Amino acid sequence: MRDGGCRFPGCRNHRWVDAHHIQHWVDGGRTRRDNLVLLCSAHHRLVHEGGFKVSGDATNLRFARPDGSIIVAAPMACSTRAPLPTAKTPRAPPMLPPDYNWAIGAALPRVA
């Protein structure tokens, strides 16, 4: 699986994710895997209602704040995301604690 959870930089959420069109369908974006990215409900709302932007393609995404500054991913606790549960793994992977300081800093506009 390509995404494994929310792709917003620093987000570790694997549940309650939505497929988001990178190029909106109104602007000619197709509903194909290479034009979709998984975002958790909170980050999906930031993109649609909070002025945040997603650009690039499914493997090379860029996220920007409403002021246009690029959001850089926070360091992850491990190099890969935990796998999603399948028929072979009946239990859900353990959730990592959220990095609230980073998440709040990423959502706030930069002050010069």
Image (cartoon, helix red, strand yellow):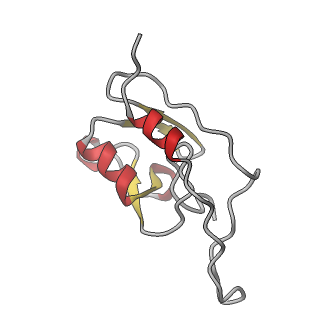
* Residue 24 in view in this figure: no
In depth, the one of 82 and 27 nearer the eye is 82
Tell me the quarter of the picture where residue 95 sits.
bottom right
Q: What quarter of the picture does the C terminus occupy?
A: top left
In depth, the one of 63 and 55 nearer the eye is 63
| Residue 84 appears left or right of 70 | right
Residue at the location (57% across, 45% down)?
A: 10
- Image coords of residue 57 (percent x, y): 52, 41
- Image coords of residue 1 (percent x, y): 63, 65
- Image coords of residue 9 (percent x, y): 54, 42
Q: Which residue lies furthest to the top in this view?
A: 112
Residue at the location (40% across, 45% down)?
A: 22
| Residue 81 appears left or right of 26 | right
Residue at the location (60% across, 45% down)?
A: 59
Tell me the quarter of the picture where residue 52 sits.
top left
In depth, the one of 12 and 86 nearer the eye is 12
- Image coords of residue 94 (percent x, y): 65, 72
50 versus 85 height, above or below:
above
